[in-house]
Amino acid sequence: MELLTALPFQKIAFRHWGPDDREGTAVIAKGTFGVNPDGQLHLASAQAPLVEGDVFHGDPASSSLKLEQDLAPFKPRTDVTFALTARAPGGNPLPDWPVSVEIAGRAFYGFHVRGPSAWQRQRGIWRLSPPDPVHEIPIRYELAYGGQAPERDQPQVHQFNPAGTGFVTDHLLADATQIPAPQIGDLSEFMADDIRAPMTVHGLGPIAKSWLPRRAEAGTFDDHWKTTRHPRMPKDYSFAFWNAAPQRLQLDPHLRGGEHILLRGFHPRPEPQRVILPFAELYLRDAAGDNRVMSLTDVQIDLEAEDPALHRVVLVWRAFLDLPPRIETLTIETKALEAPT
């Protein structure tokens, strides 16, 4: 099958098993945009290529996911992910401050960031030291609660964030006198001052496939699967496995364009940063003239650089189609949508 378009986007079509065991066609279109001072997007002169494999910040066994591969057949919800650095309001170093992202009318997600601090043991009692004032803090899962703690036989791994810090075991508490604390979390959990109390994992980037809760959506890969279904996915596999954003930033129904996204705590200025998604709809047209709407499944916002000229937003549209063999050509087209009144 040939995939055509006059748009400057990256595109691909491939066959994939659906959850109902039927083989279908996945179609993907990926566009890269710059961000204007008013938050509106414009087509970037350089379009980012399709990412064919997951990209991590370091060793995949111990670091967080930087870029999720693009070759997902479909996503039942829109993933909204961010590459961001929190920057102290006012431009002066602070020990901590709140940050948040908001998709107006759809979602709000906020937590606290802190300068470096540590759990310190004094006379058998663990206390959390005050955080050091800092100008900025990268929003990475490495700085959120989690990690790997030593045990006598093998390390114990925090299944929701193996890359993090602050996760402890009895063995670690018995041997250590100081343990680094997370820098990203709920303010109330920091104030609880309890080293043994699990903390909530917070972050804005994609979740790796091997981390919980995501990997639970892949289904059961056991001996029964090997003998009865391989190479198809397990019966309890869900397309939700391909959603990589934190669950609070997986939006159902899909975003359609025109949404305002507000970011607070990531720039020294008091007013929020704004990203406005374009009013556009992508659809597929076959030779017979039938149209199929593509879903906006990925909004990837990268405002990490201090230079606004380097800010980028990547939008990905997908469709998963049960296409008969006779269809030889699909064309990706677009039309502008009217802004809501």
Image (spheres, grey):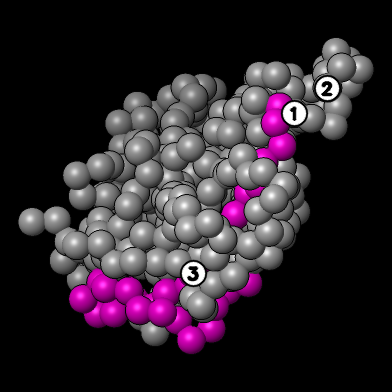
Residue type at tag 3: Gly
The answer to which of 89 and 264 lies nearer the viewer is: 264
Q: Is residue 30 magenta?
A: yes
Dot 1: few (<14), some (14–19), or many (≥20) neighbours within 10 Å? many
Query: Looking at the image, which residue is at 58% across and 44% down?
Result: 320
Dot 2: few (<14), some (14–19), or many (≥20) neighbours within 10 Å? some
Q: Secondary structure at mark 3?
A: strand
Dot 3: few (<14), some (14–19), or many (≥20) neighbours within 10 Å? many
CB atoms of marks 3 and 1 within 8 Å? no
The reply to whether residue 236 is visible in this rendering is yes
Which corner quadrant of the image does residue 161 belong to? Answer: top right
Q: Alpha carbon of mark 3 to alpha carbon of mark 2: how far?
A: 36 Å
Q: Secondary structure at mark 1?
A: loop
Quarter of the image with the N terminus in it: bottom right
Q: Alpha carbon of mark 3 to alpha carbon of mark 1: how far?
A: 29 Å
* Residue 140 point in image, percent of width and height: 52, 53
Residue type at tag 1: Met
The residue where tag 3 is placed is 31
The residue where tag 2 is placed is 229
Q: Name, please, the residue furthest toward the front.
A: 288
* Residue 299 point in image, percent of width and height: 43, 57
Q: Which residues are magenta?
A: 21-49
Q: Which mark is residue 233?
A: 1
- Judged left or right of residue 294, residue 237 is right
